[in-house]
Image (spheres, grey):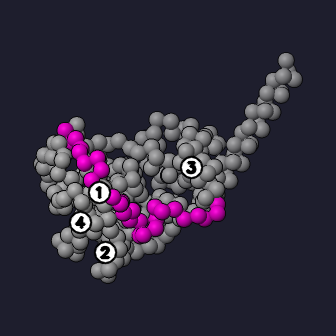
Amino acid sequence: MKHFLFFIGKIILLLLLSASVLDLSYTYIYSKSTTRNKVANVLNSTSKSYDVIMLGSSRANNHFDTQLFVDKGLKSFNYGISGSRLQESALLLQLMLVNDYDLKTVILEIDLNINSEGYSEGTRALFMPCLRSNKIVSNYYEDIIPEFNLLYYVPFYRYINYDSQIGFRELFFSAINKPSASIQNLGFSGLKGSGTNMKYDLSKYSVKKNKDYEFIKDICKAHKINLLVLSTPMCSQVKGIEYFDAINTIYPEVHNYENSVTGDQYFSSCGHMNTKGAALFTQQIINDFF
């Protein structure tokens, strides 16, 4: 029995050592990556200066044509991430400032995310490689993620748990420094096509106070950053369009642009404009505020 327990102990020790080596290896490779996604780009870079950046979900990522800001002499980058929520936007902004980013104006898209304090599993995964090495990230998630202790203390567990986002395939591309489309074109991802799936139901959404949005406001106020908060256009076939008016009853500072671009030819789908619509919308924002 003693020999059997000793054998099991050696296996467990070997597994822990292997997991630790893998954890350190994965973390090291990810710590050198700046070209695979916007989160890694922020985490592994310092001392950038921007006149304008954009934060939000795909409706920021697909709707703000960054090049038009640059053409006006405004150094800009679109940090919108498809699927992300305000929880991730707040952390990304915090990391920028810790890494000595000089930001003059932050354009925040909040429209469909203000109704919930939820999170994006896919975007959260992008922060996991630095969970143990970055105090900002670990402190931020410590009271948010129920399985935080497993992710933080068990070697390699976070890479297994988020394998589809930060597993071997993504590690390989990071190791060979293969750029992804997400950080090209100054972060703007334009959509093609028009008139597909041109209906949307907003009646299930209800606007309420949002602690993640409040946190972003506090960060910008503390660092004297001009915060420009917007709702972006949707197609005309929207049910419950009064949702956007409800936002202003709680947060009157939000600029409502939901009907600023009209015509199905400017929408790839009801919730996302194509490149032509994004150009029209971006130019209007530039004209109105810059």
* Amino acid at circle 2: Leu
Crowd rating for badge 4 (residues with CA inside 10 Å; few <14, some 14–19, many 20+)? many
Comparing labels 3 and 1, the label whose residue is closer to the camera? 1
Tell me, yes or no, whether the highlighted magenta stretch contains residue 278: no
Q: Height in image: 83 above or below 51?
A: above
x, y percentage for residue 36?
Answer: 53, 60
Q: Residue at x 40, y 74 (%)?
A: 49
Distance (Cα) linking label 3 and label 1: 33 Å
Which label sits on residue 281?
4
Crowd rating for badge 3 (residues with CA inside 10 Å; few <14, some 14–19, many 20+)? many
Distance (Cα) linking label 2 and label 4: 11 Å
Comparing labels 3 and 4, the label whose residue is closer to the camera? 4
Q: Earlier in the sequence, mark 2 or mark 4?
A: 2
Pointer 2 residue: 68
* Amino acid at circle 3: Ile
Which label sits on residue 194?
1
Q: Residue at x 60, y 47 (%)?
A: 167
* Amino acid at circle 1: Ser
Magenta segment: 175-203
x, y percentage for residue 222?
Answer: 30, 63
Which label sits on residue 166?
3
